[in-house]
Amino acid sequence: MISVFSISLGVLLALALAVVGIYFYLRDITQKKHTILRNFPLVGHLRYFFEQLGEYFRQYFFLGDREERPFNRATRAWVYRMAKNEGGVLGFGSTYNLHEPGALIFVNAPFAVLETERLPTPPLAIGEDWCERPFIARSLVNISGMSFGALSMPAVRALSLGAAKAGCWMDTGEGGLSPHHLEGGCDVIMQIGTAKYGVRDADGRLSPEKLREVAAHEQVRAFEIKLSQGAKPGKGGVLLGGKVTAEIAQIRGIPVGQDSLSPNRHLDISNIDELLDMILRVRDITGKPVGIKTAIGGWQFMQLLTDAVVRRGFDAAPDFIAVDGGEGGSGAAPQALADHMGLAIDEALPRVVDMLIEANMKERVKVIAAGQLVTSARAAWALACGADFVNTARGFMFSLGCIQALRCHTNTCPTGVTTHDAKLQRGLVVEEKFERVANYCLNMNSEIDMIAHSCGLRHAREFRREHVRIVGADGRSTALNMLSPYPAARAS
């Protein structure tokens, strides 16, 4: 009886599989969208299956440690070690190619700085003498703008707690100020994006009342007017409707479940003078430093900006400029813009600094650099170019456990960093990850100082361009101050 039942069950199962196979066969052979499936029903699905798996096989099995994009395995592993406080020590030599064009080489001093001669890297004031409440920034390395919405709630909480422990600031991104940004007690820079989320009125215009409410939080140290970001200059922020939860919708002032699409520029800023007017307006309302964030596409913008400030007076200047390289991109962006729009930070940063030096504005306007500056060497290069601070988004995402799954925009992030799926968020344990955020920041600052000491400098704010050499196409290096000479200041 049992054997007859087993045979009957097996026959039914076989029939069921045959019916399913016939159904999919007929569906594939009659559909008109996919050529492969129409010509090779059933087996054609293997092509799409392996195509989907291909990026993960390449990541873990086929590509070398230094080959992958946007961040190779060696870089990610270095960040993970920093975040876990395991140190950046390796054995048997580096796999970094010192002959590859663009490679960084720091100029070691014949007599390195002794421990007794070293000085702590000093904090730096932003907006001093120009604001009622200037911001004293303590860390060289800080958390770049990532919105609550693009990031999950536990990710924002962990970043806030970690930033407080490490003494760095956290930029809100354009999604507005949430309670999760404030939870840890860290310094916060409130970003004002083109949609003015968090500080907008019912018509989407800047609301002085809401601006004052945000500024009333002592933790909010400064405001950043976002003109563009490196991943998508000329395109506003994109948060797909699947990630617009009730809480995010309430913070942003938009409908639940609908795509959050910011305008591609501020509707009330169409030229340099209107930009400077907005800076003055926000600073007057809040009493706090106000800067701008922008990608750089050429030299006209900085020329117009510095000329206008010289004409109007230094009180009209932004208190800081966050220069975002074209290689940025922690959120959703059209590939055409991500691939081809905006100068890389390597070219943009020195030129921005040069324009400020020429206009005698370098002391007045602090410079923040961003664009794949996730390692201590890249951060030290930025400081040598003339940056005062370094921002990183994806470096801190790696510290949270990001594995570069490339799903940031899909709400299916397997590590819980960029998803609002509670089941996936469960893997991101805030009490564990905030320690890694702090470790990464503290170790970055420590290694930047270590590089400075090896260059014969007492602290990292003494970096200059002559301390870095860049490898050219012929495999030979040239000093950065020869590739990008310091300009002469204009006669006043």
Image: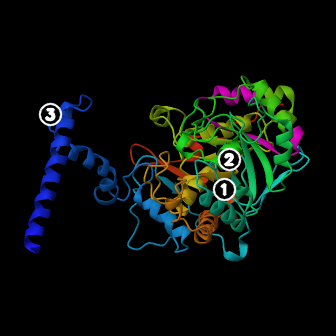
Q: Is residue 79 above or below residue 311?
A: below
User: Marks 3 and 1, Cα distance to the nearest angstrom?
Assistant: 54 Å
The answer to whether mark 3 and mark 2 are in CB contact below 8 A is no
Element type where label 2 sits in the image: strand
Single out the mark in the foreground, 3 or 1: 3
- Residue 15 coordinates in the image, percent (x, y): 13, 53
Q: Quick check: 83 left or right of 42?
A: right
Residue type, label 3: Asn
In the rendering, at what x and y percent does residue 336 appear?
A: 45, 31
Question: Mark 1 is on which residue type?
Answer: Asn
For the residues bearing labels 1 and 2, Cβ distance under 8 angstroms: yes
Amino acid type at mark 2: Ile
Q: Can you tell which mark lies on residue 368? A: 2
| Residue 47 in which image quadrant | top left
- Queried whether the magenta region covers residue 421, the answer comes back as no
Which mark identifies residue 39?
Answer: 3
Q: Residue 142: which numbered mark, if any? A: 1
Quick one: quadrant of the C terminus? top right
- Position of the N terminus, as image quadrant, is bottom left
Q: Earlier in the sequence, mark 3 or mark 1?
A: 3
Q: Is residue 386 visible?
A: no
Is residue 463 shown above or below 434? above
The numbered mark, 1 or 2, whose residue comes first in the sequence reads 1
Say if mark 3 contacts mark 1, CB within 8 Å. Answer: no
Q: Residue at x 69, y 57 (%)?
A: 180
Q: Residue at x 62, y 57 (%)?
A: 153
How far is mark 3 from mark 2, CA to CA? 55 Å
